[in-house]
Image (tube, rainbow, N blue to C red):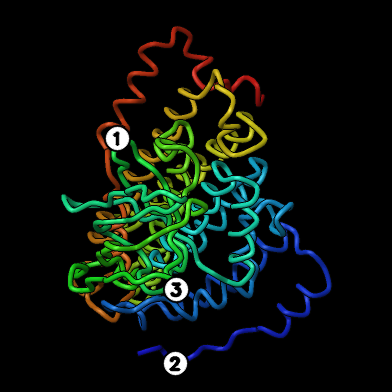
Amino acid sequence: MIAKHLPIPQLWIAHELAARQIELTDLVGRVNYVANFCAANAATIDRSGAFPIQEFEVIAEAGLLTAPLARTWGGLGLGIDASSIAKLLVILTQIGRANLAVGRIYEGHVNALQLIQTFGTSTQIETFATAVHQHKIFGVWNAEENDGVTITPLGNGKYRLDGAKTFATGCGYVDRPFIGGALPDGSWQLCIVPMDEVATSSDPSWWQPAGMRATASYKVDFTGVILDESALIGQPGDYYRQPWLTAGVVRFAAVQLGGAAALFDATRQFLQSIDRTQDPYQEERLGKMAIGIESGQLWLQGAATQLEQYHPIFAGDPAIVHPQAVALVAYSNMVRTAIEQICMDAIQLCSRSVGTRGLLPPHSIERIIRDLTLYLRQPAFDASIASVGKYVLNTNVADTLWNHAQST
């Protein structure tokens, strides 16, 4: 069942898009409307089997679907041009603040377009850019269980898929998911599946979460799908190449920080509604939350600076080995780790502040905590911290760990 439609300012968006090519500053400005829309509808779609259909209509109309394409392909370079990373992280934080489920799906779309533009051929990029301009939603589905995907060459430029993916975010709505699969030699190959052109089966019963219900992250079986060679992106192993894989964690960290900011706002509003703003213990908790949110913003700004200094294109040119790649990976893992802790602290401080009454529906706090708790459980947490320690233990001069001197 689709929620009752909320008003969308399609007229002014259409006129503006027709009048001129929007710029990144315009995009950041209109994200406030997108975020307000998403926040207003968040409770309505907080149920298993739901998907933010209206929200992505608004996102498309605002130009956010095409923005991650390079200007060559009719976009704004959002997230692929390193100079735009700061604005991308602001946008992701704002969307996450409004609805973490929407933020998760949109971040996956940005991730997919970054992968295509990094590892795809010009012909592939042009083909998929056309699909984006047709408002196709992209995503990345890489998780799997024992029955994971295999990719078998059939000859004549054809490949057969067998097996399934789990946590397939946006199942039934994401039109062009990236999936990875094992080739006969065991290497890992990326491909894009045109979901509206092939037959797959999904298992909605697999997705019965406490939080992030509206992401429709089902299990999808691709067995029997036949793809042309043009659907294979990059070379085997490209998905796991560094620093591209780890540098991308700053995107989902930005969405997560938005969730922490939403908790901060909701906690303040709840305490104001029950006239508990003069309590010194509440003041202390809110002070700690404020420090955490600001710290997260500074981490994101630091990540944007590191990426911009690293290379003009996000995470560099795949054909060139960059001497600071290990440093960028370590810094990105620091950002991810720090923001996860900030979010966990925000959950605890909020829960203590509002008590049982504030954790019951229809207060938004209950939903935000469920969504954020689930979203924070990203893979390889301990390995991420260990990579930071390994880097700093093998670097002799503390002042040059991340070349901060270059930006002063």
Q: Is residue 68 left or right of residue 211?
A: right
Q: Front-most of 58 and 239? A: 239
Residue at figure coordinates x 33%, y 21% from the top left: 389
Q: Secondary structure at mark 1?
A: loop
**In terms of image quadrants, where is residue 347?**
bottom left
Q: Position of residue 178 (x, y in %)?
A: 43, 55
**Cα–Cα gap, marks 1 and 2:** 50 Å
Q: Residue furthest bottom?
A: 4
Where residue 4 is drawn, which disc sits there? 2
Residue at figure coordinates x 73%, y 53% from the top left: 71
Q: Position of residue 349 (x, y in %)?
A: 28, 55
Disc 1 marks which residue? 185
**Mark 2 residue crowding within 10 angstroms, few (<14) / some (14–19) / many (20+):** few
Residue type at mark 3: give it. Answer: Asp
Q: Secondary structure at mark 2?
A: loop
Q: Front-most of 42 and 251? A: 251
Disc 3 marks which residue? 196
Q: Secondary structure at mark 3?
A: loop
First in residue order: circle 3 vs circle 2: 2
First in residue order: circle 1 vs circle 2: 2
Q: Position of residue 149 (x, y in %)?
A: 27, 52
Residue at figure coordinates x 18%, y 53% from the top left: 147
Give the quarter of the figure containing the C terminus. Answer: top right
Whether 61 is drawn above or below 222: the answer is below
Residue type at mark 1: give it. Answer: Asp
Mark 1 or mark 2: which is in front?
A: 1
